Image: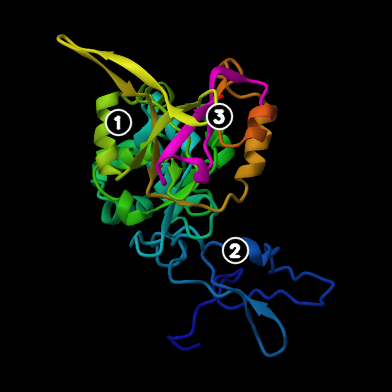
Amino acid sequence: MTKSSPSFYTSSMATEVIRHKRKSPHISAFSFPIPAISQGLPGFSAPQKTLNGDRVYPCTASTPGHNHQTPAALLGQQPLPLDGRQLQLRLYPGLSVAALKADEEKELAIWYELRAINVTGCGRLVLNKAVAALVEHSDYTQSTAYRLLRAGDGKLWDIYWSPRLPGLSQIKIHSLLQVSEYFNTLPGSPVEVKVSDFKGPRAKKTAHLYASFFKPAGSWAKPISRASIEVATGVGRRQQLRYDKVAAIKKAPHFAFQQDSQGRLVPVLHLVFSKCRQWLKQRRLGNSYHSRALKAPRGMTKRINEELKQRSLNQDQARLPKRFFLSARSYIKSPERDKEAFLLVRRRDRLIAGRMEWCMV
């Protein structure tokens, strides 16, 4: 055997090579059961075939018993570089809002990034490699990355000693279903943002978590007030304005109308008082907000949402009556309607083209 050829594991560690016969009905006294190829074999490279059809398992250079080196990670546990050019970060509005209200948005941001740097989606990463990727590409310091990983251990992931790779710590990322059960909420429809947009200080990451609560650009969004946003996300009014600038959230005003005796649209006016005078002003509804995120493939999210709905998550929270309807059909079918309901005016009937106008039903 030459120096360049790999060494082979043997029962005597010197002479006899362990071979697994294809059609041999008996097992040699010097052989041992070979695991399935798909499971891999720590310390050994992929099986190779000889000319007579036998399969042999050559030892790698990182075999613990030969050179006493730290074993390499298994396939699929190496993190993917977060270059931000091709990689997309998938955010779930329900989880983001629940994390903001529970003050655990930092741990959830790490969970999003761990899922993004996982190559095969196996849910396992080597701890040191994952921290190195977060430090290099996500603007974390090493101490901050370890601190946040320790804070989320047992909640959003598990850190454990690898039984197959002695001397290495691994991260087992919790699934979407497990994280949804932890926050006791539905994940909602996912959206995607670029890793380069998510990269930066903690305030920037939190701003994108807050922005995922709104619809992506190009989708219908109903008007909502700042007070309702504060109740839903736990973010105050002034902090909402700061996050709007950081995440580049676009907003559009909405106006209230009603029909007169002849069926024509007229604006709804209300009286405004000041210290020295009073005047009539057209009534405005809440603004609609759109984020820079894009719609993401739903994948298993639909099945998980249906499964969690059957478990009646958040069943103690009362459902608010609907106030805005996009069509007359949805208004008729809705059993929970507010006393002051509004119906979206068709584009051809609007007084000003392009303005969002709602008619009081």
**Residue 312's mark?**
none
Q: Give the range drawn in magenta.
A: 333-360
Q: What element carries label 1?
A: helix
- Say if residue 213 shows up in the picture: no
Neighbor class of circle 3 (other Cα within 10 Å; few <14, some 14-19, many 20+) is few
Magenta-colored stretch includes residue 121? no
* Front residue of this view, candidates 43 and 258: 258
**Dot 2 corresponds to which residue?**
40
Magenta-colored stretch includes residue 355? yes
Q: What element carries label 3?
A: loop
The amino acid type found where label 2 is placed reads Gly
**Residue 263's mark?**
3
Q: Residue furthest front?
A: 262
Neighbor class of circle 2 (other Cα within 10 Å; few <14, some 14-19, many 20+) is some
C-alpha separation, residue under disc 3 versus residue under disc 1: 39 Å
Q: Where is residue 233 in the image (x, y as percent from the top left)?
A: 40, 27
Q: Residue at x 65, y 86 (%)?
A: 50
**Dot 1 corresponds to which residue?**
240
